[in-house]
Image: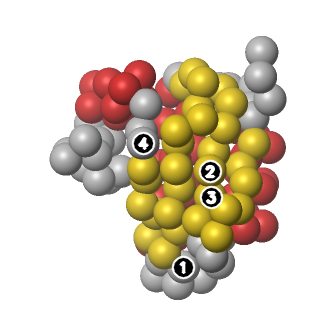
Amino acid sequence: MSEVGIQAVGDNQFVLSGPLSFTSVRGLWQRGQELFHEGAAIHLDLKEVTHTDSAGLALLVEWVCVLQRAKGRLELRNVPQQLQVIARTSRMDELLNLNGS
């Protein structure tokens, strides 16, 4: 199984990689807390996500909420089909702004 990670690729631009699952999101949550700043417009590319489940969705929803409270926002790019389906099924697609995906 590949390792999960988040890598900065520019100013407030990150690439998320590996599996987003119950066992991996805890470390990502902490890393996001270190990287995302108040008022930031974060661009998160999910092109290297290999697998996701509801825990991955929960992590992204939490990041959106944290950034909204801090007057920032999270823009997702290259959202895997699997995550889009989970988000739509749980009615979180609008919160994640996936309606156009």
CA–CA distance between discs 1 and 4? Answer: 20 Å
The disc label shown at residue 15, or none: 2
Please rate how many residues cluster around mark 3, counting C-alpha atoms within 10 Å: few if below 14, some from 14 to 19, many from 20.
some
Q: Report if the CB atoms under discs 3 and 1 are less than 8 Å apart.
A: no
- The image quarter containing residue 14 is bottom right
In this rendering, would 65 be left or right of 13?
left
Vertical placement of 49 versus 78: above or below? above
Question: Which residue is at 59% across, 32% downward?
Answer: 49
Question: Which residue is at 42% across, 42% downward?
Answer: 78
First in sequence: mark 4 or mark 3? 3
CA–CA distance between discs 3 and 2? Answer: 4 Å
First in sequence: mark 4 or mark 2? 2
The disc label shown at residue 40, or none: 1
Q: Amino acid at mark 3?
A: Phe
Expressed as whole percent of the image width and height from the top left, the position of residue 79 reads: 42, 39
Eye-nearest disc, 1 or 2: 2
Q: Amino acid at mark 1?
A: Ala
The disc label shown at residue 14, or none: 3
Q: Report if the CB atoms under discs 3 and 2 are less than 8 Å apart.
A: yes
CA–CA distance between discs 3 and 1? Answer: 12 Å
CA–CA distance between discs 1 and 2? Answer: 16 Å
Expressed as whole percent of the image width and height from the top left, the position of residue 42 reads: 53, 68
Eye-nearest disc, 1 or 4: 4
SS for callout 4? loop
Q: Amino acid at mark 2?
A: Val
Q: Which of 62/17 is in front?
A: 17
Q: How is the image coloured?
A: secondary structure
Q: Amino acid at mark 4?
A: Asn
First in sequence: mark 3 or mark 1? 3
Please rate how many residues cluster around mark 1, counting C-alpha atoms within 10 Å: few if below 14, some from 14 to 19, many from 20.
some
Expressed as whole percent of the image width and height from the top left, the position of residue 5 reads: 75, 42
